[in-house]
Image: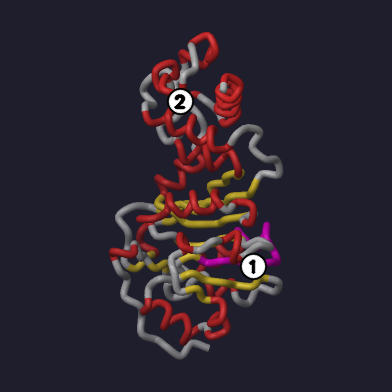
Amino acid sequence: MQIMTQLVRAKKYLGQHFLTDQQIAMNIVSSLVQVFPEGKVLEVGPGMGVLTKYLLPVQGIQTWAAEVDGESVAYLLANYSSISERLLQKSFLEIDLSTKFPDGIAIIGNFPYNISSQIIFHILDHREVVPYMVGMFQKEVAERIGATKGGKEYGIISVITQAFYDVEYLFTVHEHVFNPPPKVKSGVIRLTRKKTSLDCDEILFRKVVKTAFNQRRKKLRNAISSLGLSDQALGAYASMRAEELSVSDFTSITHLLKEQE
């Protein structure tokens, strides 16, 4: 039962935009629960608990939350006291997920736009304990994460995320369902961890991807020349650009580099 009615003030420096549409909140929660019906779920930046209220009643789900805003923490403790022992008063980016949740944790949230890419990479760094993620991002970021080769949206975050997770763009959320309304639309995506591991040296793979996209307008022979692969070794890849390569193409180039070490 809610006992604290004073609303939390959205803070620009925290990138807070509170979702007010209850149906959308339910849709976000159900998008996770339908693939992850039981286990621990960590909500990132719950604010006033618009997702929390639909997570807590789900049988089989143990809801955790990570919140840095003291005003939001006070609101959550007053209105959702059952989560008090599982409310982490720190940034999601500071949580060692692998140590804190060794048995696994799914991630959900209306993510702050200002750290959304960092959230994805933090999940990737702890993917061994994160089987699923359902989250709302700025629409442009959501589209980039799930972009396929050949388009301008396709980039570093697309390739590295898709190397480890299947990405589904679920639905678009319009500006008017937030308080305060953001200046852009939002997009909700779902990540499902792949059953197979990356078949190459991961550190080198990331280096290849980042080097290639840092000069994405150049053909690969020039974009990754600093890595030391000859045109002959690159073969057909030499005349291609980063945005034309799939995850498996980047894996193949990583193998070529590893072979010449």
Residue placed farthest to the bottom in the image? 3
Q: Residue 173 carries which label?
A: none
Write the start and end of the magenta stretch as one range. Answer: 31-43
Tell me which residue sits at (38%, 31%) in the image.
214
Could you tell me if the residues under marks 1 and 2 are in contact, i.e. CB atoms within 8 Å?
no
**Residue 193's spot in the image, x, y percent?**
64, 48
Residue placed most toward the observer, 16 or 235: 235
Q: Which residue is the site of mark 1? A: 40
Residue at the image position 54 percent from the left and 53 percent from the top? 123
Q: Which amino acid does label 1 sit on?
A: Lys
Q: Does the magenta stretch include residue 173?
A: no
Find residue 234 and report its horizontal and vertical position in percent. 53, 15
Q: Is residue 47 above or below residue 106?
A: below
The crowd level at tag 1 (other Cα within 10 Å; few <14, some 14-19, many 20+) is some
Q: Mark 2 points at which residue?
A: 242
Residue type of the residue flagged with mark 2: Ala
**Rendered image quadrant of residue 63:** bottom right
